[in-house]
Image (cartoon, rainbow, N blue to C red):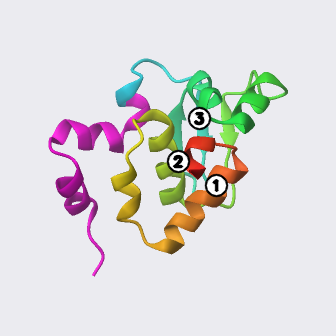
Amino acid sequence: MAATDDQIFRKHCRNSNTKAMMLNAPSQIHPGPSDITLRLDNGEVIHAHKRILSQQSLVFKAAFLSGFADVAEYGIEDHEPETMHTMIKHIYSPHNDAEFQAKPSQELLKIYLIADEYQIISLKC
């Protein structure tokens, strides 16, 4: 039986503020208005910040310095929402290896592939 998010957070996070921060990473860690909306295949949106995404991802950096510099929405295709949330949490939060140790190998492969696609070196390691 797979562990629930609450069980994982109770095991790895000692206080509830850490859980809220990780679940709502962009808005909790960098308060204030976002300047980009990431739209996932399932229609879900993630409000983020171009500057922070660009610092961690060479692909976002190139996109936001080129034709996407003035856009307010960026579509992300062919990735499951859970994988996207993991990527965004990694970009906005301190890196926590324990979080990845609990993930099944199939999920780790998806995370590696998205890290490779978006050139997020710290997520590939």
Above or below, 68 relative to 39: above
Q: Position of residue 39 (x, y in %)?
A: 61, 45
Q: Secondary structure at mark 2?
A: helix
- Farthest residue in the bottom direction? 1
Residue that appears at 72% across and 29% down:
61
Secondary structure at badge 1 equals helix
| Outermost residue toward the front in this view | 125
Measured as percent of width and height from the top left, residue 92 is found at 46, 34
Q: Quadrant of residue 37?
A: top right
Q: Is residue 7 magenta?
A: yes
The residue under label 3 is 37
* Main secondary structure of the magenta stretch: helix
Range covered by the magenta-colored residues: 1-27
Membership of 33 in magenta stretch: no
Circle 2 sits on which residue?
A: 87
* Residue 25 vertical placement versus 11 (above, below): above
Distance in Å between CA atoms under marks 3 and 2: 15 Å
Label 3: which secondary element:
strand
